Amino acid sequence: MNKEQVKDIKELLSSPQKIVIIPHRNPDGDAIGASLAMYHYLGKKHDVTIVSPNDYPSFLKWMPSSDSVRFFDKQNKQSKKALSEASVIFLLDFNALHRIGEDMKKTVETCEAEFIMIDHHQEPDRSISKYIYSDISVCSTCQMVYHFIEMLEAVDEIDSAIATNLYVGIMTDTGSFRFPSTTSTTHRIIADLIDKGADNARIHNNVYDVNSYSRLQLLGRALSNLKVKKEFNTAYITLTQKELNEFNFQKGDTEGVVNYALSLEGILFAAIFIEDVEQKIIKISFRSKGSFSVNKFSRKHYNGGGHDNAAGGRSDVTMEETIPIFLSLLPAYKNELEKSNE
Ligand code: 5GP
Ligand code: MN
């Protein structure tokens, strides 16, 4: 985003606006954190509504003002009204409108509002809006929201609610500050957020130490389903709908499970395949270490995308068919996978 555009946005936000904030479908800590932080920041002057395409995991529902999030699927009329009346729409933590689901996409495409996208995913769809703040080198959209507030010369307006929400997104998108995207700038921002009221120990506890017994049992099943393809430095996990039901699956229960596959010594490429009978798909999460781009892999084979080391996609055939297809793709990447850690 150039200086001219920052000036435009400052001007736009200098008078009260009707603002809608949209995170991506199945929002994670970064998408919800960025949305709630912006809700608090913009809410000081504007009429702000967050419209999420659908629900998000319960381990995020303690976040400041999380009650204010409206859901396009469940509160459809109210959501459509807010969208149609909006003068400004923020798109947070996604790079293309299909990421909010086809139904909501159709509505959003008819909106007359000024769009502002803030996102760290690759290849943003630049046709969506004039104002795109895109930076794929930044660990999280929450860190970008901090920089956005900085550009607006309003860091002093960051209160403890904004700080807490931003902290959650930075923490979850960096795997608690350990992924390579975590920089000294990230740590400086985190330090400032703690100074501004983010209670780091409480936040970690609220997000990570709230497992249900059944979630841990499901994790146990996932780990016993773990398979290793040593010759391709690859490991993968499967979970069928039957297994999810057996352990009373709740939204968010499988978040982070793929990282166990990546934590195996020598493994550079990890995947988890999760059956979703309702959507008739196998939802896939990919993770990698080093130069092997799961974003490219997922775009090419699984109608997905994301980042170089963390991406998602889907398979439209059964689990029994999906796994052999996945395994048949690996030989073509043998070289790349061997070199990934160099
Ligand atoms: P996760 O595996 O945790 O769901 O997602 C990892 C990353 O990939 C996130 O940045 C997420 O936004 C992105 N991602 C997940 N699923 C999809 C997908 O189906 N399409 C695209 N384009 N990105 C995805
Ligand atoms: Mn993100």
Image (spheres, grey):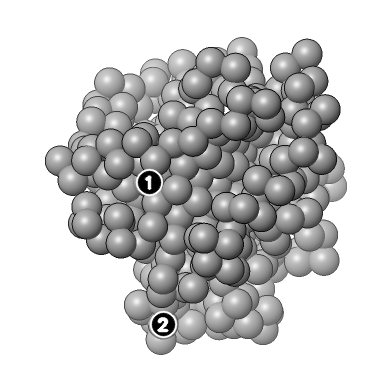
Q: Which amino acid does label 1 sit on?
A: Thr
How busy is the neighbourhood of tag 1: few (under 14 within 10 Å), some, or many (20 plus)?
some
Residue 217 pos. (x, y %): 22, 41
Q: Is residue 191 above or below residue 166?
A: above
Q: Is residue 117 left or right of residue 279?
A: right
Residue 176 pos. (x, y %): 45, 24
Q: In this view, does 46 lie to the left or right of 152?
A: left
Name the one closer to the observer, 17 or 298. 298
Q: Which residue is drawn at 61% across and 13% down?
A: 184
Q: What element carries label 2?
A: helix
Q: In this view, does 281 lie above or below 59?
A: below
How busy is the neighbourhood of tag 2: few (under 14 within 10 Å), some, or many (20 plus)?
some
Q: Is mark 1 on a helix, strand or loop?
A: loop
Q: Residue at x 60, y 31 (%)?
A: 229
Q: In which quarter of the image is residue 202?
A: top left
Q: Quadrant of residue 310?
A: top right
Q: Is residue 33 above or below residue 299?
A: above
Residue 324 pos. (x, y %): 62, 53
- The label nearer to you, 2 versus 1, is 1
Q: Is residue 245 left or right of residue 20?
A: left
Q: Residue at x 46, y 42 (%)?
A: 237
Q: If the image is split into quadrants, where does the C terminus sit?
A: top right
Q: Mark 2 points at which residue?
A: 76
Q: Mark 1 points at which residue?
A: 254
N-terminal-most mark, 2 or 1: 2
Q: What residue type is labelled 2?
A: Asn
Q: Can residue 243 be seen in this view?
A: yes
Q: Is residue 43 visible?
A: no
